[in-house]
Image: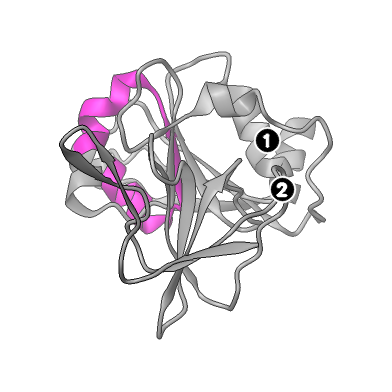
Amino acid sequence: RGRHAGDADRRRVRGEKEVCIAAHNGLDIAAKAGSDIFAALDGTVELASHTNGDYGNYIIINHGAFKTLYGHCQSVKVKKGDKVAILLMNCLEWLPLYFGILKAGCLAVPMNFRYSGDEIEYCLDLADVDVLIFGPEFITRIDPIVKKDNRLKMLFYVGDDGPDYSENCIKLMGYCSSNPPPVELTETDDAAIYFSSGTTGFPKAILHKHLSLISSCKT
């Protein structure tokens, strides 16, 4: 089921103001709530974000010759192999987020709360981070990074009244399924990227597999 808005936008008059109710050319295709959304063609995710109006949760995929936008998504999922950085103080949410990242097949990237803005940006780039989860203590350090060059697919905020560029992590966690993610994991899969303290320069990245994390727990 679709609707096409032609070159002549349909308009409605309220008082003396003319209000546009179909302001784009293209095809809108609806689906039932909760339906999985699949990309029309292969491409690269250019942006995954949220707007308070218009599209809600949305994704823009670049297919080369054209782009497609998938809006009004109930949730935006990450895939196996994505890197998810955690920049939080000690809090109740830290462990559920960490183990949730691992169960989803993503790589957890814990970050030191003492990092400066430059060190945070350096580590995000070095680990090629896709998603950042951060708390209120770090807003002043994250703001300049996002404004300068935001290559992150998604940012999740743990707290109240987060920045406009972030999602409310606590609210979204309430929608999580109780079923395990349908992701096959092995001990040889990459699991986490940890950073050295950086006492003699910028932090160094250390890649861990699931087996190394399991071994650490046993010993």
Quadrant of the drawing holding the C terminus: top right
Judge whether 183 appears above or below 97 on screen: below
**Most distant residue in the bottom direction:** 65
Q: Amino acid at mark 1?
A: Gly
Q: Earlier in the sequence, mark 2 or mark 1?
A: 2
Instruction: Name the image quarter holding residue 140.
Output: top left
Relative horizontal placement of residue 163, taking residue 159 as reference (left or right): left
Residue 45: x and y in percent read: 47, 65
SS assignment at label 2? loop
Q: Residue at x 71, y 48 (%)?
A: 32
Q: Of circles 2 and 1, which is in front?
A: 2
Picture mark count = 2
Is 139 in front, or is 75? 75
Residue 141: x and y in percent read: 23, 32
Instruction: Name the image quarter holding residue 112.
Output: top left
Q: Residue at x 35, y 24 (%)?
A: 162
Report the Cα–Cα distance between label 2 and label 1: 27 Å
Q: Mark number for residue 73? A: none
Q: Residues within 10 Å of mark 1 (few under 14, many from 20)?
A: some
Is 102 in front, or is 2? 2
SS assignment at label 1? helix
Relative horizontal placement of residue 83, taking residue 115 as reference (left or right): right
Q: Which residues are magenta?
A: 120-143
Q: Residues within 10 Å of mark 2 (few under 14, many from 20)?
A: few
| Magenta portion: prevailing SS class | helix
Instruction: Name the image quarter holding residue 89.
Output: top left
Please name the residue that numbered disc 2 is placed on.
32
Q: Amino acid at mark 2?
A: Lys
Please name the residue that numbered disc 1 is placed on.
100
